[in-house]
Image: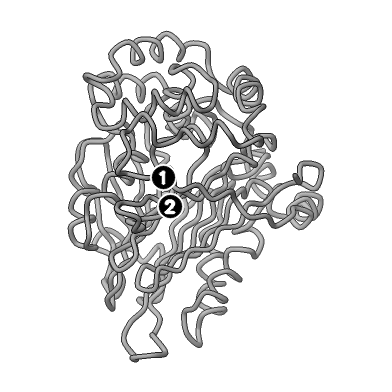
Amino acid sequence: MVGLCASYWVDDSTLQSMTRSRVQTQPRTFVLDLDKAPKDRWTALAQDPVFENYKKDFTNYVGSYIPKAALPIITDITRTLKGKFYPDYADEMIGLADALGVSIGDVVLANLIYQVEGIGRACEAGNTTGPCPPKAAGPGMCTAVVGNGQDSLDGSGIIWQGRNLDWNLDATLLKYVLRVEYKRQNKTIFTGVQIAGEIGVLHGLRKGAFSVQLNARDQGGNFLNNLGQIVLGRKTPTHVMRYALEHEDTFEHALELLSTTHLANPAYFVMAGIQDGEGAIVTRDRKELVDVWHLFEAPSKDTQGINLQPDWFRLQTNFDHWTEVPDDDNRRTPGVANMAAFCADGVNRSCVMQVLTTWPTQNHHTDVTSVMCPKTGHLDVTVWVPPSHVV
């Protein structure tokens, strides 16, 4: 029976048609001035009419998807926000709550969606992200690809990173996807992609340094366990990525930070840099680094040749790269084959986008597609909206 459910979504022509019907839109751009006091950085959102229904939309979303057992813990975190839990970003979160017209508890919850919302696989498979969607519904996670190309100007290496966010967000929230330009002294320090209400980033780029994204790692725990880690002071992966983008100016330094910071939940960080070979999949447990698989490097853990990939690219979904993927969510095999075929003549923005928009890498759960190049600073972001929700 599991096998039937597993193949169902991949072969379902209705789901493919649903995916093709989605409309390609651009996210809103917001400029965040890091020179302002933290509580004032998000104030301008209050003047944007697109956010006038944010409170209602977010409240409806929370009521539908967030386990009630999480709410007392959220309240506890809110009481001591500036101390133990978010000393770096507490004032920003308070100002953001004011700008969006919601409670600080709502903003805390928005920043913990990854820990509590049902974007994971089946519970019996060791879901890390909360309530369990049916397997037949297909994936609810992400795909990352990092490829080593060549700069047409100087012939040196140029690394491209592609990212699909397969979150299956409620369609009413897609208009709140933001491209945020973080500036200091009127200069962009980095660009992050996030949902309004989040302080951390889902993926981002620092020009001349690196790009990074988060993929869910389906390895043990549940939402209460993950929230317990927050109470103990562990960092959420989205906030760690923002800190890296804001404070680290090299691929190596960012890799070190992302490899060593204690996390609230297991995760994959997928990174690209600006030099030949600067691309890696970082597999993390909460406390320890599990593995780093670089471009042009033999995998140390895949001793059985389970996941053979050409050395000039790395593709990651939501399962450890040295293990077999489950039948009910095999996006890896077609993704690797497409990357090898579409980018065989050179890795560039066009071929990476082609990989990301080919079924089943792009599927009925894909909400955001981004292509990044840290060497040039290129970052384009597409939000996929159902026709009925195009603004």
Quick check: 66 left or right of 95? right
Image marks 1 and 2: residues in contact by CB distance under 8 Å: yes
What residue sits right under mark 1 in the picture? 32
Comparing 151 with 207, the one in front is 207
* Residue plotted at (58% across, 51% down): 368
Quick check: 127 left or right of 219? right
Quick check: 51 left or right of 160? right
Three-letter code, disc 2: Glu
* Residue plotted at (61% across, 71% down): 354
* Residue plotted at (50% across, 50% down): 179
Where is residue 163 shown, x and y percent of the image?
A: 49, 58
Above or below: residue 163 compared with residue 275: above
Can residue 236 be seen in the rendering of this structure? yes
Disc number for residue 214: none
Three-letter code, disc 1: Leu
Helix, strand or loop at disc 1?
Answer: strand
What residue sits right under mark 2 in the picture? 181
Give neighbour class at mark 2: few <14, some 14-19, many 20+ (Cα, 10 Å).
many
Where is residue 205 shown, x and y percent of the image?
A: 38, 59
Count of numbered tags: 2
Comparing 161 with 265, the one in front is 161
Helix, strand or loop at disc 2?
Answer: strand
Precedes in sequence: disc 1 or disc 2: 1
Tell me which corner region of the image, top left, top right, bottom left or bottom right, holds residue 209. bottom left
